[in-house]
Amino acid sequence: MASQQLRAQTLPLSPGAQERSWQQQFEGAWELGRRGVPLPRDPDWKALCERKPFERNLLQNPNPEGVNISEPAPRQPPNSPRGPLESLGNFSGWAISTEALPPQAGDKKPGSAAPRLSWCIKQQRVDLLAEGLWEELLDSYQPNITVMDWYEDSRLAETVYQLHVRLLAADGQTPLREFHHQGPEHGASREKKNWCHVSHVFHGYGPGARYVHFQHRTLDAETPGGLCRTRATDSSVSVQLRD
């Protein structure tokens, strides 16, 4: 009798029982019923548990240079030449490009060459369905989508940073909602090269959101003394259920 009970206790769960167990674990963790969240049409509950789609940063390598916002931005070595940004850290997942800016009146100081300014553009596109979210959730419940970023006030110009975030439809092109920011904001203290924080929450954005396109631009200046950069770090895109 004891051996029969032991065998019964160690028998693996049937596939159906395993799926129900994963469902209970996922629904219990996020209280989907209490929140009125519609369930996916054909769910893979184990995959949903493993992907952890909520309250997780969906961007890859959000801090590619490993800088710490609790400390002043590290000093840049003198006479730094412009080189591949990828040599400074792990930028996998980011599409990187540069946009040169035309010279501005007043940039040149007497007896010195005018700095050559350019935007360093880094961007990612997040596929919400691939990250574990589902159509019924996005179209009906429309969870909050929060974007955050930190950037260094390098004081290279009046504006040293831009953030452009778009919620895109299934074609990956059509914008449904947009958020744009440039900084530092007017009136901000610029006595020190502080880290600046920017955030935005998308809510009530309507049905059809499938992608989040995240792009930030940081200002670089090539001077006779070398390259001066504006750094950004701890970028994030995350999804939250409402209480």
Image (spheres, rainbow, N blue to C red):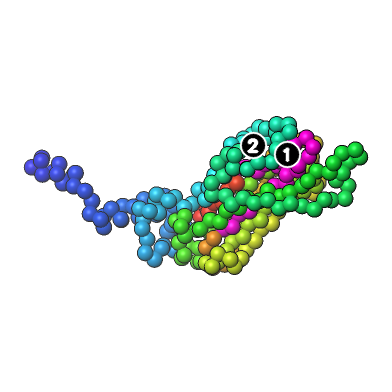
Q: Which mark is residue 32?
A: none
Name the magenta segment's main secondary structure.
strand
Q: Residue at x 46, y 57 (%)?
A: 130
Q: Residue furthest right?
A: 110
Q: Is residue 83 above or below residue 51?
A: above
Which residue corresponds to the image point at 84% horizontal and 51% vertical from the top-left? 104
Marks 1/2 in contact by CB < 8 Å: the verdict is no
Front position in the image: 201 or 24: 201
Indicate the quadrant containing the N terminus: top left, top right, bottom left or bottom right: top left
Callout 2: SS: loop
Q: Is residue 156 visible?
A: yes
Q: Residue at x 44, y 50 (%)?
A: 52
Label 1 or label 2, whichever lies nearer to me, is 1
Q: Amino acid at mark 1?
A: Leu
Numbered tag placed on residue 69 in the rendering: 2
Nearer to the camera, 189 or 119: 119
In x, y percent, where is residue 73?
Answer: 68, 35
Residue 57 colored in magenta in the image: no
Magenta span covers which residues?
212-234
Q: Is residue 226 magenta?
A: yes
Residue 158 on image: x %, y %: 80, 47
Q: Which residue is mark 1?
A: 227
The residue nearer to you, when weighing 16 against 151, is 151
